Structures are given as C-alpha cells and as structure tokens.
Image (cartoon, helix red, strand yellow):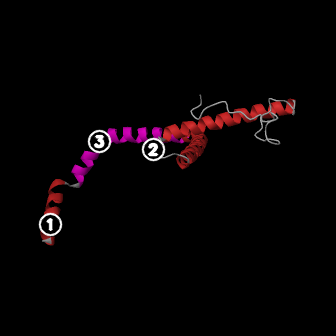
Amino acid sequence: LESMSADAFQTEFEGLTSFGTLFGEALKTADTFACVAVTCVVIALLYMVLLRFLVGTCVWLALFAVLVLFLFGGGLLIARSSQCQGAELFDTGFQLAVATTTYLASSATNAVNQAVDPNSYEVLSETLLGDGGNGNYTGAQTRTVDGY
C-alpha cells in the first residue's frame, strides 16, 4: 500500500511539472510577487514606525485598564460582602455609594466647622455627656439609606 501511494505521487508529480513549466509559471506571476513584496515592506515599515510612537501609550493604557478592573472587582466584592439576602447587587452598590459620599461630605463639613470653631453646635459628634438631657448631642443623620 505504501509503495502504491508513493508511485502514484511520483507519477503525478513527473507528469505535471518539469523545470520549464515551473519557471514559466513563476515568470507569469512575477509582477504579482513584486507587488506583494513591495506592499509587505511598506506595511512592515509603517507598522514599525507606528509601534515606535504608540508603544508607550499602549503600555500605559493597559496598566490603567488593569487598575480599573482591579478597582471595579474590589468594589464589586465589597458590595457583594454587605449584600442582604434577596437584595439586588446594583441596589446594594448604590446604597454603598450613597453611604460613602454622605460620609465623606459630612466628614469634610465637620472638619471645616471644627477648624473654624471647635465649640460650635454645627460640629457633629455622637458622644453624650452625662445622661444626655443637657442637649450636648450634636449627631445628625441627613439622608436615608437610598440617598434621599
């Protein structure tokens, strides 16, 4: 079986090709080879020039994309860790975002008010002195869990 396939291949190859027919076919397609070669050289040079100028941008863009993905994944995991049963993940994430922005805004306002006048009633504090009846409680909750 092996010798039959080798003999058949050799017979076909000898019948179809000779040096003259191969050289003739190459001459017929020489202009195509030249066009392809010139086009490949131009594309390769253009690629190398663009790569030289854009490689820094691509590297920084990739690093920034990885950082954004890590931050997004971390935020998603934090939201998932405090998610209540039956609550949607996006609702939990929204509530966490509202809580974070409210906390940051009230902390900044509190820091400014305390820097201006530490004894002001506008400085929020959750501490109580005594039984709390003397009006020294200045804590405040100004938003609901949904941000209203």
Marked residue nearer the N-terminal end (3 or 2): 3
Label 2 crowd (10 A; few <14 / some 14-19 / many >=20): few
Marked residue nearer the N-terminal end (2 or 1): 1
Image quarter for residue 16?
Answer: bottom left
Question: Does residue 45 appear in the picture of this structure?
Answer: no
State the image coordinates of residue 25 (x, y, percent, origin top left).
25, 46
Placement of 9 over or under 89, stated as above or below: below
Label 1 crowd (10 A; few <14 / some 14-19 / many >=20): few
Provide the residue span drawn in magenta: 19-48
Image quarter for residue 75?
Answer: top right
Label 3 crowd (10 A; few <14 / some 14-19 / many >=20): few
> Which residue is found at the position 24% from the left and 54% from the top?
19
Can you identify the residue that label 2 sits on?
A: 86
State the image coordinates of residue 107 (x, y, percent, origin top left).
74, 36
Q: Amino acid at mark 3?
A: Thr
Q: Amino acid at mark 1?
A: Ser
Q: Amino acid at mark 2?
A: Gly
Q: Is residue 22 magenta?
A: yes
Q: Which mark is residue 5?
A: 1
State the image coordinates of residue 94 (x, y, percent, origin top left).
55, 36
Pick the quarter of the image with the N terminus: bottom left
Viewer-side residue, 60 vs 40: 60
Q: Is residue 121 magenta?
A: no
> Which residue is found at the position 75% from the left and 33% from the top?
108
Left or right, residue 46 beside residue 105? left
Question: Does residue 144 appear in the picture of this structure?
Answer: yes
Q: CA distance from mark 3 to mark 1?
A: 31 Å
Pick the quarter of the image with the C terminus: top right
Viewer-side residue, 9 vs 60: 60
* CB atoms of marks 3 and 1 within 8 Å: no
Can you identify the residue that label 3 sits on?
A: 29
